[in-house]
Image (cartoon, rainbow, N blue to C red):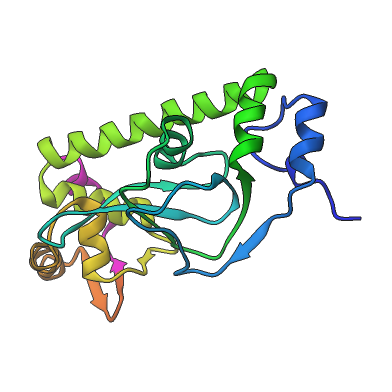
Amino acid sequence: MMPDWTLRALGLEELDPAARRALGRLSPQVLRAGHILFRPGDPVSGFVMALSGRVGVYLTGPNGRELLLYSVTPGETCVQTTLGLLGEQHYTGEAIAETDISVVLVPKDMFIDLMGVSPPFRSFVFRAFAERLQTVMGVLEKVAFVTVEARLAQTLIERAQNMQVHATHQELAAMIGSSREVVSRRLEILGRQGIVSQDRGMVKILDPEALEARASR
């Protein structure tokens, strides 16, 4: 018998027994990094719950520039999915698995039913929705009021593992709402100052204190 995934899903700790039984009948899916979960114009077929890994949700402007709107990790939800299910809207962004992920797709009919009969599930959805909306507002605030250098430095700090960030200049540009050319110039400056070094598809942090100072400007 497969273990009940709902028992390890962040945010579902207070789930009522009936809702847990219904969700427990669904099977998690493992998707590889790079898998596209949805694209602009796709209908919303169900509520995606992340059990592991990270999904990036991007918007693409008319000029082709991408902006990372938010990432979805365990215990978090996708604003676009929730809006699509409750408001009958199609997706306007694109979701890409940034790492290998494990997810559960709650069918639309089950999602609507649980929203009506399970207060703990409804509370989880709306709480996660509110938190994610705050993240989106934070992104808009940074793009509007925080310098490119500070946004880049903060992103490098947040994404670093063992002082390394595995991302291309284009991917970093999407994360901070800028262009690849601007990111390349900023990284060159940070490199000349001895704060970072670069390799293909990777940025290594050499002076974390100096980078922290750049992030706070």
Q: Which residues are magenta?
A: 204-217
Residue 154: where, in percent of width, then height? 26, 48
Total marks in image: 0
Which residue is at 38% across, 59% downward?
A: 160
Which residue is at 41% across, 31% downward?
A: 87
Closer-to-camera residue (176/193):
176
Can you name the residue that lies furthest to the right here? Answer: 1
Residue 132: where, in percent of width, then height? 41, 34
Closer-to-camera residue (146/36):
36
Judge whether residue 29 is colored magenta: no
Which residue is at 47% across, 30% downward?
A: 86
Image quarter (top left, top right, bottom left or bottom right) of the C terminus: top left
Residue 16: where, in percent of width, then height? 77, 24
Image quarter (top left, top right, bottom left or bottom right) of the N terminus: bottom right
Judge whether residue 211 is colored magenta: yes
Would residue 40 appear left or right of 179 to someone viewing this image? right
Would residue 156 appear left or right of 144 to someone viewing this image? right
